[in-house]
Image: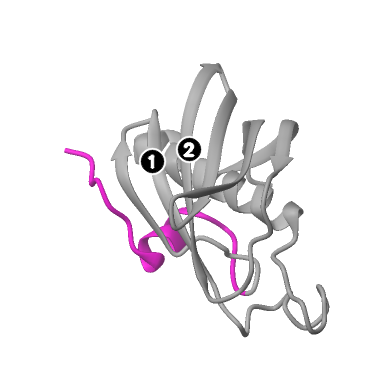
Amino acid sequence: MIKKNLNKQEIIDLLPHREPMLLIDQLYDIEKLFSATAIVNVKKDSFFVQGHFPGNPVMPGVLIVEAFGQAAAALTAHGLDKETYDNKLVFLMGIEKARFRNPVIPDCKLELKIQAIRSHGRVWKYKGDAFVDGKKMADAQWSATIVDKK
């Protein structure tokens, strides 16, 4: 039976990302290889706060997209059997229809609701919506591929 919730350490065990670039803190409501919700705790001491923008910090849109990609990679890695995913990485291939609707400011919990739209071999397509306190902050569609580690 597949586990429905992953904590930070379990995400670290699945993904190659490390601090400060590991953005997702939790993955829950996992429906195997289909959907999940990720949490990004956007903190006042997050690495981007000092320079983006001093005195009025916001989480860069590219990092929101990166967080979408990490959540999708964790969903996929968690859903595949260990032998299939062993010595593999999930690489972002393309981003489509990314929209940033409201600024994400530090000291919030960014909730990413992601869904796998389709897969064809090693190529996957996803979509996601980002929320803070129920308010939509961003949405995007993206594609990724599973590649062999070198």
Instruction: Give the residue displayed 36% in from the left and 36% down from the top.
Output: 79
Q: Are marks 2 and 1 in contact (CB under 8 Å)?
A: yes
Instruction: Name the mark on residue 112.
Output: none
Image point 74% across, 75% down: which residue?
57
What residue would you read off at disc 1?
36
Q: Residue furthest top?
A: 120
Residue at the spot of label 2: 114
Residue 120: quadrant of the picture: top right
Q: Which residues are magenta?
A: 1-19
> Residue 69 is drawn in which quadrant?
top right
Q: What is the basis of the colouring in this image?
A: one colour
Secondary structure of the residue carrying tag 1 is strand
From the top left corner, tell me how far across and down residue 4 is, in percent.
24, 46
Q: Where is 123 relative to 136, above or below?
A: above
> Disc 1 residue type?
Ala
Percent across and percent down for residue 37 are 40, 46
